[in-house]
Amino acid sequence: MIQGLKIKFAATGGVKLTQSVCSLLHGVLMENIDRDYADVLHMQSLRPYSQSFYFDRVSNALYWQLNALNAQAKDELLAAAFALPEKVLLRQKNMELQIVGKEYLLATDYEALAEKYFAHLLAGKYLHMHFITSCAFKSEGQYVIFPQPQFILGSLVKRWNAFADKESLDAQGIVHDLAQEVYVADYRLRMQAFSVDGARIPAFRGDYTLGMKNNLMSNRIIAMLGEYANYCGVGIKTALGMGAVRTSLKGRFY
């Protein structure tokens, strides 16, 4: 089970809120879920959810999106978020956010995603990724702030394998093999740090496109993982609001 929830907040007037508010909302969420489940989550290295906080210029509103990556996260986390009162207090900023709308997004599951990409023709060979919150990776204890294919694919394979029931991608060396079947077709990125508990994490935002070569099986897996990225996020600290991405599969590169 994969399910999303979008919560709309009223604009805050002259107060500017950044993507990092998501880490504060994470604290609100933890206060409103079952304590035993919260303890279980704190012991997990990969959390079964992702979240993001962003401003939409078209609707002039702030959005908090939560994505549950398994059924328990849906039942525990999304239900708690949906039950939040009309006003949410951010204690660290001593301010309230007013909720003006809540909407469950279309649900899917791992089997449905696998069937979509293995039973039908692919819509294209270019995977475009638009990072709506800052993204970074970690390798050998150091932050990596350029989205190399092996880091993107490694992040997605790890999350897929952690939460998929039967559709595991467990072939030895699969991340290396997949990375050999893509190339960087385009990117327009900028540095934008993400703050967590006062610490600034070096990171990037922007647009990034991977071109896929001629290995049909690899292309199917990569396209499937590309759609999964919309739910699970990419890179580190996706549970605190980093690495939120919107992806699309394109037939031609422009």
Image: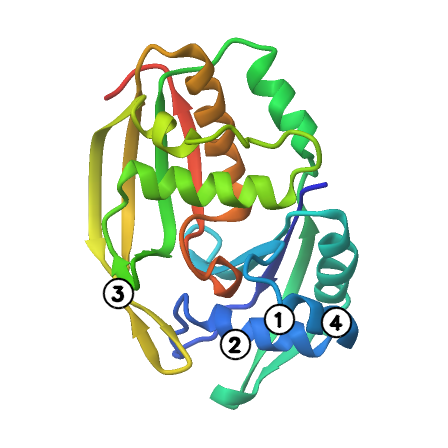
Mark earlier in primary sequence (3, 4): 4
Q: Position of residue 246 (x, y in %)?
A: 44, 41
Q: Amino acid at mark 2?
A: Leu
Mark earlier in primary sequence (2, 3): 2
Does 234 sit above or below residue 199? above
Q: Position of residue 65 (x, y in %)?
A: 57, 56
User: Label 2 belongs to which residue?
Assistant: 24
Element type at marker 4? loop
Element type at marker 3? loop
Number of the label disc, if any, that sits on residue 202: 3
Q: How busy is the neighbourhood of tag 4: few (under 14 within 10 Å), some, or many (20 plus)?
A: some
Does 163 sit above or below residue 120? below
Using the image as rendered, state which of residue 121 and residue 181 is in the foreground. 181
Using the image as rendered, state which of residue 38 and residue 176 is in the foreground. 176
Q: Residue at x 47, y 13 (%)?
A: 122
Quarter where residue 106 is shown? top right
Q: Residue at x 47, y 30 (%)?
A: 172
User: Label 4 belongs to which residue?
Assistant: 33
Disc 2 from disc 3: Cα separation: 19 Å
Quarter where residue 51 is shown? bottom right
